[in-house]
């Protein structure tokens, strides 16, 4: 098929939506499809559309459905879609109705949807290649925070937790991600002055961020909302255990019984979990073992197979258009 893959993220951006779009495009091409990635659908011929973000991609979703009322249309729900926009935004809700299939990136995502929408919803976990490093820090316990500085990420919770860990001079927090507002940048710089153990390194290439992660002892994911954080996949691939805010998106990635959660927005609770990871070797080993146990869910082959099954299901279950797709014929405008 000729697939229009829509993501609102700019081509050179380093956010999660852009990484997902680039990875999915490569996987879909490996399955024999032709894929064009763009921020907005320009009306070019396509047999199907996959759109990331129900609200921000709504104009493309609506235009494609109007032009091709019988063509497969998939909408992938992000964290802000699931946990905010579909409750309050008319265009996000309209995208849910227009889609033939909805995709969530972790198994708790379905619970946010009405029962009638769950029937057309599929779960596809994101993936990461194996990451390894032999140069782990020898004298410092490094906590990595990977994510842009924006409100939904609660970006400074790990830095604030240092205030409850003053007796651990060998601890450091390395924070990688762009400041998306001047206020966020000012706060990051202020917190570095308050405690030299906090290092904000700014926006770095993805490969460099993964090297920092692989050389860390722990990943902290402090988000207020997540659709299915790819950094959890990357931590599992690197063998780095995770401490995460107890929110639906993180529980859907790590499992309900995972012991490494803390109350969202509570730096004292986060500090308690970090201290346990440093001081309690059995607890740290358990975090590491359980993070690694999720790795099969996050393998590229599993993500690619999820995409293959999704498209096969769409072409099989929609008879009016199935013959055109079997022969590779283009849909008429």
Image: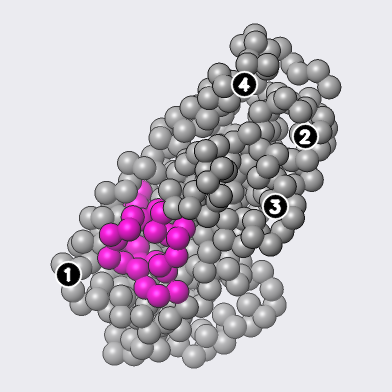
Please give the residue where the numbered disc 4 appears in the rendered image. 318
| Colour convention of the picture | one colour
Going from the N terminus, do you reach mark 4 or mark 1 first? Answer: 1
Residue at 70% over, 77% down: 182
Quadrant that contains the C terminus = top right
Residue at 77% over, 27% down: 68
In three-dimensional space, the C-alpha distance between marks 3 and 4, rounded to whole angstroms, equals 24 Å
Which of discs 4 and 2 lies nearer the camera? The answer is 4
Q: Residue 91: in sight, yes or no?
A: yes
Neighbourhood count class around disc 3 (C-alpha, 10 Å): few under 14, some 14–19, many 20 upward: many
Which of discs 3 and 1 lies nearer the camera? The answer is 3
Residue at 59% over, 83% down: 187
Please give the residue where the numbered disc 1 appears in the rendered image. 281
Q: Which residues are magenta?
A: 235-264
Q: Residue 64 got which mark?
A: 2
Q: Quadrant of residue 268?
A: bottom left
In three-dimensional space, the C-alpha distance between marks 4 and 2, rounded to whole angstroms, equals 17 Å
Disc 3 on helix, strand or loop? Answer: helix
Q: Nearer the viewer, residue 168 or 106?
A: 106
Q: Nearer the viewer, residue 41 or 288?
A: 41
Q: Is residue 208 left or right of residue 246?
A: right
Going from the N terminus, do you reach mark 4 or mark 2 first? Answer: 2
Please give the residue where the numbered disc 3 appears in the rendered image. 92
């Amino acid at each position: 098929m000729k697939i229009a893959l829509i993501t609102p993220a700019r081509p050179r951006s380093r956010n999660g939506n852009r990484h997902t779009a680039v990875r999915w495009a490569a996987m879909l091409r490996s399955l024999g499809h032709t894929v064009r990635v763009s921020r907005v659908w320009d009306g070019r011929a396509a047999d199907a559309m996959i759109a990331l973000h129900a609200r921000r991609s709504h104009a493309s979703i609506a235009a494609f459905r109007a032009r091709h009322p019988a063509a497969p249309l998939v909408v992938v729900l992000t964290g802000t879609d699931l946990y905010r926009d579909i409750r309050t935004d008319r265009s996000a809700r309209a995208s849910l109705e227009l889609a033939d299939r909805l995709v969530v990136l972790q198994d708790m995502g379905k619970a946010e949807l009405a029962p009638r929408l769950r029937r057309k919803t599929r779960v596809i976990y994101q993936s990461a290649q194996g990451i390894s490093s032999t140069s782990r820090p020898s004298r410092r316990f490094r906590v990595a925070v990977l994510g842009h500085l924006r409100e939904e990420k609660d970006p400074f919770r790990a830095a604030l937790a240092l205030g409850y860990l003053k007796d651990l001079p060998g601890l450091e927090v390395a924070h990688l991600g762009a400041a998306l507002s001047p206020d966020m940048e000012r706060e990051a710089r202020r917190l570095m002055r308050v405690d030299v153990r906090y290092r904000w390194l700014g926006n770095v290439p993805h490969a460099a961020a993964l090297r920092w992660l692989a050389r860390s002892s722990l990943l902290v994911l402090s988000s207020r909302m997540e659709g299915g954080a790819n950094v959890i996949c990357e931590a599992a691939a690197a063998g780095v255990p995770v401490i995460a805010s107890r929110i639906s998106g993180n529980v859907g990635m790590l499992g309900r019984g995972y012991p490494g959660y803390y109350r969202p927005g509570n730096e004292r609770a986060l500090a308690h979990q970090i201290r346990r990871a440093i001081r309690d070797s059995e607890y740290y080993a358990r975090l590491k073992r359980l993070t690694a146990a999720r790795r099969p869910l996050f393998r590229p082959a599993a993500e690619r197979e999820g995409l293959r099954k999704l498209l096969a299901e769409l072409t099989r279950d929609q008879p009016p258009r199935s013959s055109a797709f079997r022969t590779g014929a283009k849909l008429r405008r």
